[in-house]
Each structure stands twice: as structure tokens, then as C-alpha cells.
Image (cartoon, helix red, strand yellow):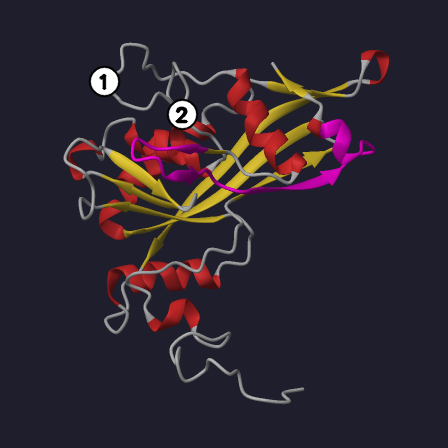
Amino acid sequence: MWLNVDQLAEKYPGINPYVFVANNPIMFIDDDGRDYRVFFNSATKTVTIKATYYALGKDMESAQKAIEYWNNQSGQFSYIVGKKENSVSYTVNFELSAIEVDVDPQLGERGSLNNALKQDSSGGANLYTVDNTGLDPNTNGTTIGGNYIKVKDTQADADTGSHEVGHSLGLKHNRKGLMTPASIDSSRSSNINSNDISDMIQYPAKGKVNSERNSEGNIMRAGRGTINNDTNFRMKDIKNGKAQ
């Protein structure tokens, strides 16, 4: 029941619960905090990490290549929950998908992407773009808000996309492997490790989001995960599990 008008309504006419992204889908994303999902299945003894990446037609090849890297990691790791004889090993799988977005002339490219994100009800939606706009000359890619990936056009076929997808799956930078801060780092490789898998699962189990500060001192958050637990284990047990 509405009893009175918001006292600040006249001061902020474009911002209210009925106005999506303040009527400015070019500048803002409706960040609902759901970027990927983790499914524990007791019957199959698997833990499956799922996410969807919306991209324009021109960016689909890069998006597909980026998520293919992660899908190919399926079966390479396991996650152990419980102690000693009561422990259970769950095979870690990835089910990432890319969906092409048609451009609505009235919304434009960015608005059409944001609208797709808004309409998604999976609980694991992200945007993937190949776009130089706003990127520092020395930056190959970035992930904004944990779910808006932007890759420089010269890096569309490189591992930059896979790196940024890693951020959307809850990872911050690492000292070696795929998640090093820069692609030119001597310790950069196409590998991920068990600690990366643990972070993807344990942060949502803790109800937390992985984050770090960038070179300017700003906090950059990784993707936020949610867990679907179809096991007899408690969330505390999952939180204390370990990937290997």
C-alpha cells in the first residue's frame, strides 16, 4: 500500500523501482548479483558450474572460444566434501554456454545486451563483448561488476576471453597460470589449478564474493556464485571442502 510520495521523487525523477537501469541501458547494467551457479548432484557425484554469456553476433566466435576453454576442463578436477571415511569426491564439470543477441534498433547494441541480461532467469547470466571502448591502451580486457566482459579486438582470438570468463566465475588474479594479471607475464600459461576450483565453490558457500584492488586502488569484484546443494552435506561441509 502506498501511503505517501517519496520525498525525494522530484529530485530523482529517473530513478525508482519501476525504471530499469535508470532509463539508461547504455551506461548501466542491472547487476542482480547472480553470475554463475554451482550444482552438487549426489546421484552422479558431480559438481557442475554453469553460466550463460550473451554476445552480439560479431562477438560470438570469441565468446565460444573463451567458454570452450572452461568446458574442456570438465573432468580434470574433483572436489572432496566431508572427512575421512565419510568423504565424497565430486567430479567437477563446466557447462558454459554463449547465446547470440539480436540488436533491437530502438535499444542499440548495449541496450539489447542489457535487455537480454534482464530477461535471463537462470541465475548465471553475463555479457561478453569485443570492444575497445573505455579500455586503457595497455589493457587487453576487463570484467566489470563480475558479469560484464570486455575484450580488446586484437585479443579476440587470444586467451584474454578465457581469462575474463574466469573472473566472472569468481576468480581474482593469480601469480601463475591463466589468471595472471597480464598476458605478457612470464608465469602466464593456459593452466588453472585446484585453488581456482576451490575459490569458485567456496566463496558462494561462504556467501561471499572474491575481490581485489586494481592498480588504481579500486575494488574489483569477481562473479558472484550461488550453490544448489542436492546432497546430505551441509553448506558448512561444502565450504570446508577441497579441490584436487
User: Foreground: 172 or 233?
Assistant: 172
- In the rendered image, residue 49, in percent from the top left (x then y), is placed at 56, 35
Q: Tell me the residue at 71%/34% (across/down).
A: 41
Write down the residue under mark 2.
173
Q: Tell me the residue at 55%/53% (across/down).
A: 122
> In the figure, is residue 171 to the left or right of 149?
right
Does dot 1 land on a helix, a strand or a loop?
loop
Does dot 2 land on a helix, a strand or a loop?
loop
Q: Which residues are magenta?
A: 212-238
Q: Is residue 42 visible?
A: no
User: Foreground: 3 or 184?
Assistant: 3
* Quadrant of residue 228 within the rendered picture: top right
* Quadrant of residue 138 within the rendered picture: top left
Where the C terminus falls, by quadrant?
A: top right
> Is 189 within the magenta?
no
Three-letter code, disc 1? Ile
Give the class, few, some or many, for how many residues have Cα within 10 Å of label 1's Cα (few <14, many ≥20).
few
Q: Tell me the residue at 31%/38% (across/down).
A: 142
Write down the residue under mark 1.
184
